[in-house]
Image: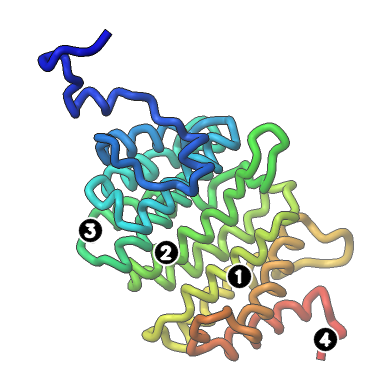
């Protein structure tokens, strides 16, 4: 039966229609314009980002959020998205904790390209939550057959590089934070899902911007040197293997460089120090 004129649906009512996320994803994530508010999108994305369903969390929520944040579609709710992500570093479910840095990374990179969206004190508050979580996270598995990608180490590395862009005076702390992450002794997880390379890429990006002295650029490697000091014969502990793998990746990244990105000012000095540490297990290196 046809609606009378006074029964015509109001625009606000359209916001209650369920969003077809599989179709949105299949169409390449066009931004919804059908009376869907940014706050509602942020709420729905935030809920899906803790889902144990890898498709919902990764393919729908994260992919959509990262794209729309980068496009500036969610600028009005950027701080809310960041606040929610930062609050999840203490969440009881691992997938919630490990996808939080990815959202912070997207938010911070948006702030870097469009300064003024995130106040300094807000970014500092997020950094405090992130820096407390990153070296302390105990579930560092890259992949889980049920939950899909978790990747605490890799996702945290991406966030560290993004924090360096928005909080450049935190770069030396961020370098040390990455070093503390790779040298955590209480782990039985071997970096098998390119965690070493993701850490190396992040470290290279943190080192890129000018302003660090040579001593600051190299000094963070003391964390690795101190952790490795006193190692003797016998099997290599998992954490030491991860550290050596990351140092190898870092040396490669610094000597080859990142595609379409500038080389760090002190790349040669950092690579040389990394190579010196690699002579501990690989004594035959020239």
User: Does dot 3 land on a helix, a strand or a loop?
Assistant: loop
- The residue at which mark 1 appears reads as 200
- Of marks 3 and 1, which one's residue comes earlier in the chain? 3
Q: Position of residue 180 (x, y in %)?
A: 56, 61
Whether residue 186 is visible here, answered yes or no, is: yes
Residue sitting nearer the eye, 53 or 197 = 53
Residue sitting nearer the eye, 148 or 177 = 148
Residue 162 badge: 2
Image quarter where the C terminus lies is bottom right
Q: Residues within 10 Å of mark 1 (few under 14, many from 20)?
A: many
Residue 117 badge: 3
Residue 45 badge: none
User: Does dot 2 land on a helix, a strand or a loop?
Assistant: helix
Mark whose residue sits in front, 3 or 1: 3
Pointer 3 with pointer 2, Cβ within 8 A: no
- Of marks 3 and 2, which one's residue comes earlier in the chain? 3
The image quadrant that residue 85 belongs to is top left
Whether residue 97 is visible here, answered yes or no, is: no
At horizontal 47% and vertical 73% (from top left) the residue drawn is 206
């Amino acid at each position: 039966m046809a609606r009378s004129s006074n029964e015509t649906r109001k625009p606000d009512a359209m916001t209650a229609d369920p969003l077809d996320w599989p179709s949105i994803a299949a169409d390449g994530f066009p931004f919804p314009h059908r009376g869907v508010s940014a706050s509602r999108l942020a709420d729905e994305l935030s809920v899906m980002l803790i889902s144990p369903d890898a498709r919902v969390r990764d393919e729908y929520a994260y992919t959509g959020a990262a794209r729309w944040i980068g496009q500036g579609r969610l600028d009005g709710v950027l701080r809310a998205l960041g606040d929610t992500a930062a609050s999840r570093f203490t969440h009881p479910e691992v997938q919630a904790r490990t996808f939080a840095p990815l959202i912070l990374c997207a938010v911070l990179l948006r702030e870097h390209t469009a300064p003024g969206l995130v106040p300094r004190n807000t970014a500092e508050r997020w950094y405090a939550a992130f820096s407390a979580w990153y070296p302390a996270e105990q579930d560092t598995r890259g992949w889980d057959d049920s939950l899909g990608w978790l990747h605490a180490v890799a996702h945290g590395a991406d966030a560290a590089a993004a924090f360096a862009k928005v909080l450049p005076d935190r770069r030396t702390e961020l370098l040390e934070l990455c070093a503390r992450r790779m040298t955590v002794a209480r782990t039985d997880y071997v970096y098998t899902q390119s965690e070493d390379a993701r850490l190396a890429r992040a470290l290279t990006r943190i080192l890129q911007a000018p302003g660090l002295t040579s001593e600051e650029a190299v000094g963070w490697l003391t964390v690795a040197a101190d952790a490795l000091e006193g190692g003797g014969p016998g099997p290599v502990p998992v954490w030491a293997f991860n550290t050596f793998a990351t140092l190898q990746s870092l040396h490669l990244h610094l000597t080859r460089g990142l595609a379409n990105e500038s080389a760090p000012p002190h790349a040669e000095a950092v690579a040389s120090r990394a190579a010196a540490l690699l002579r501990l297990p690989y004594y035959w290196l020239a």
